[in-house]
Image (cartoon, rainbow, N blue to C red):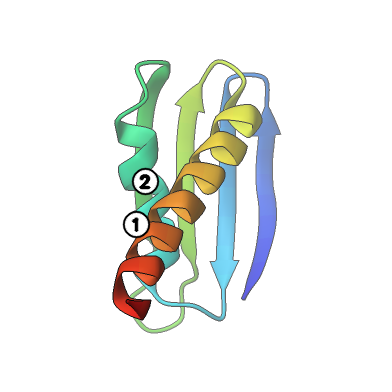
Amino acid sequence: MKVDIIEDEPKSLILEFDGTDRGVAELLKGVLMQDKDVDFVSVVKEHPEIGKLRLVLKAEKPRALVVKAAEEAEKMLDQVSSKLKK
């Protein structure tokens, strides 16, 4: 999976995902939606066959929020993994 930063502004961040399905982007979106500091978050794909997935985030300090969301998603997946290993 490759992640490119398409837009990096003080109140806006757009990440583009290549080599993955919607799962990663949707997981991040779900975690971000729970954060009260997020004004807007969406996963978009401009064209169903050739477009790449984009995570669009509008918030104060969007980079920090994505890092926090990724860490939270990792914890969630670790919990699932540990339950299944028992």
**In-image side of 55 versus 39 (left or right):** right
Q: Where is residue 78 in the image (x, y as percent from the top left)?
A: 45, 61
Q: What residue type is labelled 2?
A: Lys
User: Which residue is labeled 2 in the image?
Assistant: 29
Q: Is residue 46 above or below residue 43?
A: below
Badge 2: how crowded within 10 Å, few (<14), some, or many (20+)?
many
Considering only vertical position in the picture, is 43 above or below 36? below
The quadrant of the rendering that contains the N terminus is: bottom right
Q: How far from the left and from the top, in percent, is residue 5?
A: 69, 50
Type of amino acid under label 1:
Glu
Q: Nearer the viewer, residue 21 or 35?
A: 35
Q: Residue 62 carries which label?
A: none
| Picture coordinates of residue 28, whole percent (x, y) | 42, 49
Q: Say which of 64 and 76 sits in front.
A: 76
Q: Nearer the viewer, residue 81 or 8?
A: 81
Residue 26 — which label? 1
Query: Secondary structure beneath disc 2?
Result: helix
Relative to 74, residue 51 above or below: below
Whether residue 17 sits left or right of residue 2 in the image: it is left
Q: Which residue lies furthest to the front in this view?
A: 86
**Residue 5 placement, left or right of 74:** right
Give yes or no for contact between labels 1 and 2 (Cβ–Cβ under 8 Å).
yes
Compared to 14, does 39 lie above or below?
above
